[in-house]
Amino acid sequence: MGNESYEQALPKQQQPWPGYEKNMRPKVDHGERSYMGGAKLVGLKALITGGDSGIGRAVAIAFAREGADVAITYYEEKDDAMETVGWIQEAGQTGRAIQADLRDQQECEAVADRAYHELNGLNILVNNAAIHIEKQKLGEVSPEQLERTFKTNFFSFFWVTQTALKYMHSGDVIINTGSASGFRGHKTLTDYAATKAAIHNFTKSLAMQLAPRGIRVNCVSPGPVWTPLIPATREPEQVSSFGENTLWGRPAQPSEIAPSFVFLASTDARFYTSEILSPSGSVLNL
């Protein structure tokens, strides 16, 4: 599918928090009709946090079509989560949806435990759950927002990984979702960008620690991506111009990001660790 397939302009729109797939225009492409698996992950077991929508759903679909059983987490969006599970099952794989508030350490630990027991194994961990709320001035970021952003976007990665490592062995893989803003900053997402920079560093530090165990740790850091968070956290006028700062003049669809995760999860990337892939539309260069 060529780039021209996604040239539809984004209309002005807004949604209540946390945003829902069914209300988005244009529809999000997670690869439901386009992704064709190549048996790269046959027999593996994967946990994806924040797998109900956006990048997480696209990765879940791709992993399932590559032969993996997949558990996802979701916060409130049960309908979206069950739709993702449906796509996993349509691929002939086991799918599980686990409701969790990832700001809570005990719930993060329980997620990893449940995924391991319900899938009968855990080979791939994708730390992906995230939130962001735009604020024009630093003083507008409340202590509550700062804590929520860091707990969701970074602490959860730390906590889920701590427990998941009890079950992971040589050849297994951890993939963290970063962001181009973690490299370049973001004028109105100061707290979010800081969490993504932390994730990039966490990836590299953890890779050093786990290399002797044979566990690879990498990161995918996209630029702007069309997900439910966008209309749920921006003014309508901001939505219509979202992604114009890439060389393509538009945001990515999640289906265009998922292949990076498949590559890093597969044996094709067996020499990759401590790496950050950035499918950003060259937003870093603009």
Image (cartoon, rainbow, N blue to C red):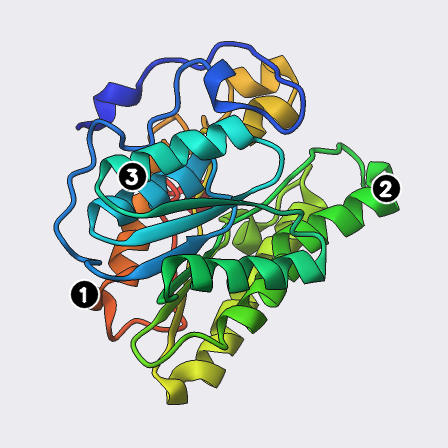
> Is disc 1 placed on a helix, strand or loop?
helix
Residue 252 seen from this side: no
Q: Could you classify mark 3 by the number of other residues whose Cα lies within 10 Å: few (under 14), some (14-19), or many (20 or more)?
A: some
Residue, disc 1: 268
- Estimate the spatial distance between the alpha carbons at disc 1 and disc 3, rounded to whole Å: 25 Å
> Is disc 2 placed on a helix, strand or loop?
loop
The type of residue carrying mark 2 is Ser
Q: Is residue 138 left or right of residue 271?
A: right
Determine which quarter of the picture holds residue 123.
bottom left
Percent x, y of residue 58: 35, 39
Percent x, y of residue 128: 50, 50
Question: Which numbered circle lies on residue 142?
Answer: 2
Q: Residue at x 37, y 43 (%)?
A: 282
Lower position in the chain sequence, tag 1 or tag 3:
3
The type of residue carrying mark 1 is Asp
Q: Could you classify mark 1 by the number of other residues whose Cα lies within 10 Å: few (under 14), some (14-19), or many (20 or more)?
A: few
> Is disc 3 placed on a helix, strand or loop?
helix
Mark 2 or mark 1, whichever is nearer to me: 1
For the view shown, which residue lies furthest in the bottom direction?
212
For the view shown, which residue lies furthest in the left direction?
38
- Quadrant location, the C terminus: top left
Q: Is residue 144 above or below residue 268?
A: above
Residue, disc 3: 89
Q: Residue at x 25, y 75 (%)?
A: 271
- Estimate the spatial distance between the alpha carbons at disc 3 and disc 2, rounded to whole Å: 41 Å
The type of residue carrying mark 3 is Gln
Q: Residue at x 57, y 72 (%)?
A: 162
